[in-house]
Image (cartoon, rainbow, N blue to C red):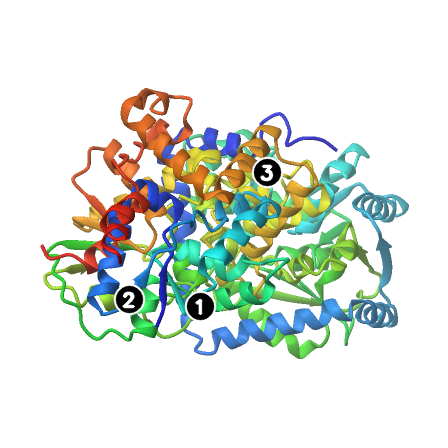
Amino acid sequence: MRVALFIPCYVNQFYPRVAVATLAVLEKLGVEVSYPPDQTCCGQPMANAGFEESTKGTNELFIKNFYNSDFIVSPSGSCVLHIKDHLHSHNNEVLASQIRGKVYELTEFLTDILKVKGLNARFPYAVGLHQSCHGQRGLMLSQMSEIVGPPFSKTEYLLNMVGGLRLVSLERADECCGFGGTFCVTEEAVSVKMGVDRIQDHVAHGVDVITGTDMSCLMHLEGILRRQKSRIKVAHVAEILNAND
Amino acid sequence: MGTPGKMGDHAQRSTVFNQDEARVNWHDKTLWFIREKRDKAAKQISEWEELREQASSIKENVLGNLYNYLLQFEQRILDNGVQVHWAATAEEHNVIVYDIIRKKGLRQVVKSKSMLTEECHLNEYLETHGIDVVDTDLGERIVQLAKEPPSHIVLPCIHWKKEEIGELFHRHLGTPSGNSDPQFLTAAARQHLRHHFMTSGVAITGVNFAVAETGEIVVCTNEGNADLGVQLADVHIACMGIEKIIPERKHLGVFLRLLARSATGQPITTYSSHFKKPRPGQEMHIVLVDNGRSERLKSADFRSALKCIRCGACMNTCPVYRRSGGHSYHYAIAGPIGSILAPGLDMKKYADLPFASTLCGSCSNVCPVKIDIHTQLYKWRQVLVKNGHVDGGKSIGIKGMAAMFENPRIFKWSGAIGRMVMKSFPFILNNKLNPWYKRRDMPQPPSQSFSQWYQKNRMGHGK
């Protein structure tokens, strides 16, 4: 099984520890992981701003970097969803279509492909799970509060394997944090208000650490938490699955 | 037609709305309460998701065969003794309605809720021609007295607090100042409206569903105001968009179950009034309005927005709507559905609306007719950029970003420079000109990227 690691551009630059943790979680489970060194970005920042036309170059580069692997795994539901929904190519549509079918967000790869039954991890804190929308509603990592159907959560399933960890229930289990890509600056007032409200829900329930499958949401929440001088920390789910505190 | 108007675009208006945080909290909680009521009502129906699927397929069928259904409907209503009018545009609609009223020599109109007449700005048109229009839905009457447009399609005055309504009624209806008891205020509105019901010769209603099979129209209200207006008036004018058709009467069994549960969490609206033919001596008119709908029908990407049954569930669930208020959308229909409808009418004026979303997807999940609202928001963004409706600065920035991401060397170099600048000269980014920094700290830049870490720790070891 050739697994290629896809690290979102901003994680690569700002949160290398999340990428290191992702690599470590996969390697501990016996997966041989490669990291195509010339990767940059999935193209979502441009496409969500309306500039899908300008993502042709990044699409071709993505295909060049990743076509030669059985699975592509990434610690980001949002970037994975973008690839699944929007990766196309004029020269290599067959390869693009194959990639769309074999790109996985980390927790769904662990539950659906590796079918993980246990983890050797310990994280003795009260943890609040922030359901990032693209992972949840796009990749269906968990049941959505709007839908009438049986509950499930791939992310919670994994977090419940972590020793000492206490998952905290929130008032609004899956409300958006307000990051939203360029929305976070073009609609600054609403974006920050959404983040403030999301944090308040975690605060009210005595959370120590807010986790999630997308560092972009967590970066936005972390920015507010640090400005508030809050004691609450953020940690990507990969960091918790790799923790031995 | 122009830009978003003197009060600015969605971002500017919602910045103003957010200056009063306590009010934003109140607005958010009020609408979230309705979203929760909707969840509870939906979850009592085990076949809810199948019902949504069915409603969606019925509407798809309608859109695919609209021409035939409209002809069938027209034939039935003519058979029923109802007069039919076709309006290609909002202006034509207004002229038709005014002509009916004028020819009867009438001046007083009561109107129950109709988003179509809001879309066409009928009230303003009739008022400039000397016709008195009184909105009889309580929420609509409140915003009408306040000279405001509705901020929500089902809950027009959801942005008003009861104390403010008390003061408004004091000024306009002469209720005692300081009395904000909802029951008292409702009773006062009732008395006030009763007078208009009794004296108005014309009743205008909207249409929730128009049944092609029978030629009847169904109007759903909680206050019975459509019913009362029509029963007391000599002339009934029902205004509908051409997409309001459903093929058969039995399909009401699907839509009436979905509509009120999605809208307010009620099992059904208090009144589902069926109007089929005028009573002896009464005139009944149905005005069928296109106003851009057949144009939209041609668009594979955007046609399904015409499935909308105007329940407002997408507004109640939208975390952006709840925190920006309906008026920030500067269109008759606010929220996610308004943001995909409005640019179809005027791309330039409403170019900001598809960007007033995080694309979280909650709207598509609550939609009772399964409109892919957030996907259409994404697609509208592409259309708006292609048509040059985003500002040049943003365009240059995004294209620069794209160029960086196309080239791994430039990406690595820019990343390293960026992190170095953030570390050494934080004031370049940590200032008021950076919207991120206004109320959020910047990420703390690490000394090396993951690529650099990997190069050092893995590539060097022959891995």
- The answer as to whether the residues below labels 1 and 2 share one chain is yes
Residue at figure coordinates x 20%, y 56% from the top left: A240
The CA distance from mark 1 to mark 3 is 35 Å
Which of the two marks, 1 or 3, is nearer to us in this view? 1
Vertical placement of B302 versus A95: above or below? above
Identify which amino acid the numbered label 2 is placed on: Glu
In front here: A227 or B459?
A: B459
**Residue for badge 2:** A32
Task: Pinpoint the chain carrying mark 1.
Answer: A
Disc 1 vs disc 2: Cβ atoms closer than 8 Å? no
**Which residue appears at 25% of the width and 35% of the height?**
B447
Residue B304 seen: yes
Q: Earlier in the sequence, mark 1 or mark 2?
A: 2
Q: Which residue is mark 1?
A: A102
Q: Please identify, in this view, whether the residue under mark 1 or under mark 2 is nearer the observer.
A: 2
Q: Residue at x 13, y 66 (%)?
A: A120
Asked whether the residues under the numbered discs 3 and 2 touch, taking CB atoms below 8 Å apart as contact, a structural biologist would say no
Mark drawn on residue B258: none
Residue at left offset 82%, top offset 60%: B282
Are tags 1 and 3 found on a single chain?
A: no
Asked whether, in this view, residue B449 is left or right of residue A42, the answer is left
Q: Nearer the viewer, residue B377 or B146?
A: B377
Work out whether residue B16 or residue B212 is closer to the camera in this orientation and state it. Answer: B16
Q: Is residue B142 above or below residue B235?
A: above
In-front residue for pair B50/B275? B50
Relative image position of residue A126 (x, y in whole percent): 15, 54
The outermost residue toward the right is: B103
Q: Which residue is mark 3?
A: B352
Q: Position of residue A79 (x, y in %)?
A: 43, 54
Amino acid type, label 3: Asp
> Residue A76: x percent and y percent?
37, 55
